[in-house]
Amino acid sequence: MSGCALCGRPLDDAATIGTTSRHGHPSRRVACLQCSLVQVSPQPTQQALATFYESHAYRSEHGPVPITVGGLAGQRTYHPNDGDYVDALIKMGRYRAGWAWDHAGLVPGMRLLEIGSGDGYTLAEFAKRGLDCTGVEPDKEEAKLSATRCPTNAKVIAAGFAEAPYEPPYDVIVSYHVLEHLGDPLSALRAWQELLTPRGALVIEVPNILAPSLPVDTKHFQWVHLFDFSEHTLRASLMVAGFEVLEMACNGGNLRTVSRPAATSEPYDMPHGGAYVEGWLDAIRSLGEST
């Protein structure tokens, strides 16, 4: 992809905001000077990504990670070695399902599709609430294991997102921390829209580039994250792909949205360009060095 995935502007003079990702992987990350979308340029080849995802290195680098669960008054970070880490994963799945239930107007009997169902805990929570659930997970081992965690009204398909045997239409599609991994997020969003009913809901969660972990380069950026979204670029991406954004929530280091297929296409004017993101992250880097 030679131009910006969102606005198409050439990336030759984009603002370079990082050259190294977590675990020391070289990765040039730029912010488009026109729309500020952050993307890896050049992207790794699909073969390189596939090999990395299937390797032991991926499992060791991107296996279980610390997660924070709870409201502002009772947040706790759980680590993989904690005896109640699995309980935390269940709580996280319950929280995600509850948020989507409350904000996307879900009711029992609806057909739900989860793109990237991962460990299955979130899919299981949706199924327990009476939804007819399907999960798609490219990792065959993960898909097999997650299927054992789900009630009988949920199934998990082990397949790539482009090749999965979908059975549309779905009333709701949910996807947590997947969009940033995809080589062409707008094409993916358009494809997901085609799987929805005309009034279906899309619930997405992605990391927030403007609220990274410190230090930026060794904690937030990941080699397999081909894009990093802010509230503005995520909203713009959804609108360009044909969605109406109903709600955008900033939850710590993550962004969570509810959208529906739009009746009409509307332009979205970006409030700032890549230089703003570059300056923001440089300020965070400086803060980290002074603490």
Image (tube, helix red, strand yellow):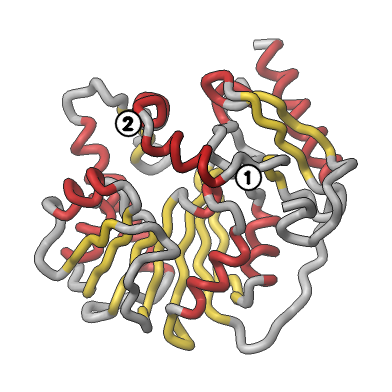
- The furthest residue to the front: 47
- The furthest residue to the right: 13
10 Å crowding of disc 1: few (<14), some (14-19), many (20+): many
Residue at 66% of width from left, 49% of height from top? 230
Nearest the camera: 28 or 231?
Answer: 28
Q: Is any part of residue 58 visible from this angle?
A: yes
In the displayed structure, 114 sits above or below 229; it is: below
Q: CA distance from mark 1 to mark 2?
A: 21 Å
- The furthest residue to the top: 290
10 Å crowding of disc 2: few (<14), some (14-19), many (20+): few
* Mark 2 lies on residue: 64
Percent x, y of residue 187: 60, 66
Side (left or right) of 79 relative to 250: left
Side (left or right) of 250 relative to 69: right
The three-letter amino acid code for the residue at tag 2 is Pro
Residue at 45% of width from left, 42% of height from top? 50
Nearest the camera: 155 or 233?
Answer: 155
Nearest the camera: 162 or 234?
Answer: 162
Side (left or right) of 139 relative to 124: right
Residue at 16% of width from left, 55% of height from top? 147
SS state under label 1: strand
* Mark 1 lies on residue: 228
The three-letter amino acid code for the residue at tag 1 is Asp
Percent x, y of residue 22: 55, 24
Q: Quadrant of residue 162?
A: bottom left
Count of marks, rendered view: 2
Lower position in the chain sequence, tag 1 or tag 2 = 2
Residue at 60% of width from left, 27% of height from top? 21
SS state under label 2: loop
Percent x, y of residue 192: 48, 71
